[in-house]
Image (cartoon, rainbow, N blue to C red):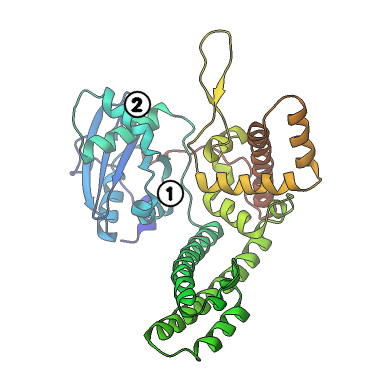
Amino acid sequence: MPLARLRRAPGTGRSPEHPASSQGGTLIVVGIDGHKNTHTLVAVDPLGKRLAELTVAARPAGHLKALAWLHGFGSVLVAVEDCRHLTRRFEADLLNSGHAVVRVHTRLMAGVRRSARERGKSDPIDAEAVARVALREPDLPKACLDGPSRDIKLLVDHRRTLVAQRTAIGNKLRWFLHELDPELAVASRGLRRLCILDHLAQALIQHPGTLAAIAAELVADCRRLSERINALESQIRRLVAARAPHLLAIPGCGVLGAAVIIGEAADATRFVSKAAFARFNGTAPIPVWSGNKVRVRLNRGGNRTVNHALHMIAVTQVRGDGEGATYFAKQLTIGKTKTEALRLLRRRISDRVYRALLADQADLGQPLNPPPPTPVSLAA
């Protein structure tokens, strides 16, 4: 049976594989603990009481079995532990079948497990903790199908891997060149330039021996990686220019920085506000006060990749003479240190990036304020 037809299948009788079904339209929350080979599902009622559980293979046949099991409940909200490298295919099948799916960060589950009556750790315990977090937290990020932002993230991650490989090869090549001939020293970042690599290849022909032969191979590897990296950058540039003109219009935001933000943030509408986006990227401070004196400290959590992209935008703005530099100088005049002023600017840029992401999605015809996930009612 196709996955899309399970939602439309007639009949709402109780499935023989689980002992409980919804009563009177009561919302049932199903938590999922995903693994490489299996997925464990646990259904709980609005009070957090476990109703049923199921473990299926992390394969298409197991997904069909899980969807048929979910079909026996009335109103279903599915909560998935946020391990997208393990559950991405299952999430897509759930979304294509019409289910509302939210993601639960793993750190939210720890407190629920500690407060549970059942001690220990197992797949059903983790799945139940996921479901109870979904009951407790009303503003969890909702899952959505992969789109262009996923393609951009894959390209950015692949480019980062190739750059790391080129750096490792270049470090070894520099030592070999120094041993062969100190006059072959290459300037910093020179191994990125194809003309310099061609010059090295010609120079190494004049040096006999195994060391020169290995160095020539490393030069060829650097050239191959550089050509591939340049091709990826061109591909990323085309995708980002078509998808995020408002983001690129922010002073200091380059193509690669914009690509990182788009790929990591994915759907900007999943953040309920600019404050939620700031918590996601780690620019929102953490309150640490009790009493009358309000104090906050630096947030070292959040998505550090996006945080680094915002930091680079802030540093670039400070070096210029635009609005960011003016704001930075103003903070210094009122007594802030350079580090504190840069953090404040980074938060200010986070808010602007959030507005730009929403504007770009609006231009692409995506809703700015989508409704919250609506449970799928299968009752007659």
Q: How crowded is mark 2: few (under 14 residues within 10 Å), some or many (20 or more)?
A: some
Image quadrant where residue 210 sits: bottom left
Instruction: Identify which residue, 28 or 91, lies in the foreground.
Output: 91
Tell me: 237 left or right of 5: right
Q: Percent position (x, y) of residue 247?
A: 69, 51
The image shows residue 39, relative to residue 148, as above or below, that is above
Instruction: Identify which residue, 330 or 88, lies in the foreground.
Output: 330
> Which residue is depicted at the point 30% across and 26% down?
48
For disc 1, the marked residue is 98
Q: Is residue 8 visible?
A: no
The image shows residue 184, relative to residue 25, as above or below, that is below
Q: State the quadrant of the C terminus.
A: top left
Q: Mark 2: which amino acid?
A: Pro
Q: Residues within 10 Å of mark 1 (few under 14, many from 20)?
A: some
For disc 2, the marked residue is 46
Q: Percent position (x, y) of residue 184?
A: 55, 78
Residue located farthest toward the top when viewing the structure as drawn: 292
| N-terminal label among 2 and 1 | 2
